[in-house]
Image (cartoon, grey):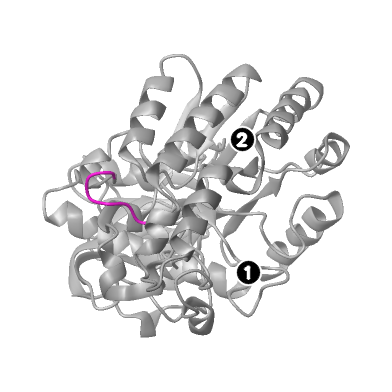
Amino acid sequence: MDLVIKNCKLLNENGEYFIGVENGIIKEISKTPLKGEKTIDIKSNIILPGFIDPHVHFRDPGLTHKEDFKSGSESAANGGFTTVIDMPNTLPKTNTYKAFKEKLAIGKKKSIVNFELQAGVNNYEEMKKVQSLKPIAYKIFMDLESDSALEQIFKDLGKLKRETDYNGLVCTHCENQEIVNKSSEKLKEKENQNAIDYSYGRPAISEDVSVKQAIELSDENNLSLHICHLSSSKSLLQAQNARKFMDISWEFTPHHLLLTNDAYEVYGTLVKTNPPLRTKEESIDIADIDENTIIGTDHAPHTLEEKTQGTWNSSPGIPNLETVVPLLLTEVNKGNIDLNLIPNILSKNASERFQLKNKGEIAIGKDADFTVIDLKKEGKINIDSFKTKAEYSPFDKYPYKGKQVMTIVSGKIVMDNL
């Protein structure tokens, strides 16, 4: 075999294992020694199916001063991720055949991890052309569209599902345009502007109204719905109820799980993000994680200059690829998350939702994508060790216990901090 990984601990299995890899595929899992051209000793640490981030912004093309596919994929590998799904809000937007094809070529040239692309929405004929390139899903930024435009977009996607091989999966950024505009304009009239005002300018009700609309329009058009960065507890309840009658999923970000809007008082516009951090009463939290949860980092890097332009002009977004795993493993060590949930919420559930058939599981015949974690490793999150171009994080200096120590993509080591 090409590679043998030895002294592996598998979750819920006694003893230690050898995993044999050939041509990027898991060939054998054994308690007895295996022979290979190369052997890696992971020193009795836990090996998990490679982590999948269904929501990253690599800014390539057009905004590569913030991030590009090289730095973004290195950031993913450093954070323990073997697969990422990139968003379409680049320059140009990835909502034409030409732009989608060009971004695919960029990713293939620069990425050191597996990647998939979401397509932006467009008129029906253009989306039909894009569909020939097999986007993993279509992304709708509902806060940028009117109600009538949204009705047409969902209708067109329903038609696309009927007439092509599109599987009907639509991913939504749920905030209501009208509510956001009215609330923000009112707050901009204030004499003294504070960073926290931004969270009230995009209130939780704007998300709740938008989630309701996304559920209704997806159901009407026979589409499968994935709600990105769900942050409101009322929106979560709506999504949970919708499970009774439709195909729906959602993702949580680390910042919405671990921070509330009082973080604006500490970090100012560095924690500005869309949807914004919520009040403690309105927010989701760690207790909302269950076996169906999907974690999406919404890794959204900017320059420090872009992040410090005041309440309304600073760019929204937080880089999370290199912080989320130690943050969640720390919660495991605190007893707030069951360790058995980690492979589900960081790999298996996303692989199933986005139909990444050879990923999300350590089993013979699956892709040899692995994330090795050391549950005992302690330290403080340090942005100086990040591979992303972004030079900020609200989690800088945050103490952790538990960390990713090795990332393996298709049988090749892309990060080794053992």
- 47 and 242: which one is in front? 242
Which segment did they paint magenta?
Answer: 276-282
Magenta highlight on residue 281: yes
Q: Amino acid at mark 1?
A: Phe
Q: Is residue 405 left or right of residue 216?
A: left
Label 2: which secondary element:
strand
Direction from residue 112 to residue 266 in the image, left or right: left
The image position of residue 163, as x and y in percent, is 81, 22
For the residue pair 3 and 181, the one nearer the viewer reads as 181
Precedes in sequence: disc 2 or disc 1: 1
251 inside magenta stretch: no
Numbered mark located on residue 390 in the image = none
Q: Residue at x 47, y 65 (%)?
A: 189
Query: Which residue is more in the foreground, 130 or 214?
Result: 214
Residue 95, percent across and down?
77, 50
Crowding at mark 2 (Cα within 10 Å: few <14, some 14-19, many 20+): many
Q: Please give the residue where the numbered disc 2 appears in the rendered image.
A: 170
Q: Tell whether 265 sits left or right of 25.
A: left
Answer left or right for 266 relative to 299.
Answer: left
Find residue 373 and report its horizontal and vertical position in percent: 29, 60
> What kind of residue is marked 2?
Val
Residue 97 location (% of width, % of height): 84, 49
Q: Is residue 97 above or below residue 223?
A: below
Q: Nearer the viewer, residue 311 or 328?
A: 311
Position of the C terminus by quadrant? bottom left
**Residue lying at 28% horizontally and 44% vertically, measured from the top left:** 282
Type of secondary structure dominating the magenta stretch:
loop
Rounded to the nearest angstrom, the CA distance separating label 2 from label 1 is: 23 Å
Helix or strand or loop: what does disc 1 sit on?
helix
Residue picked out by circle 1: 69
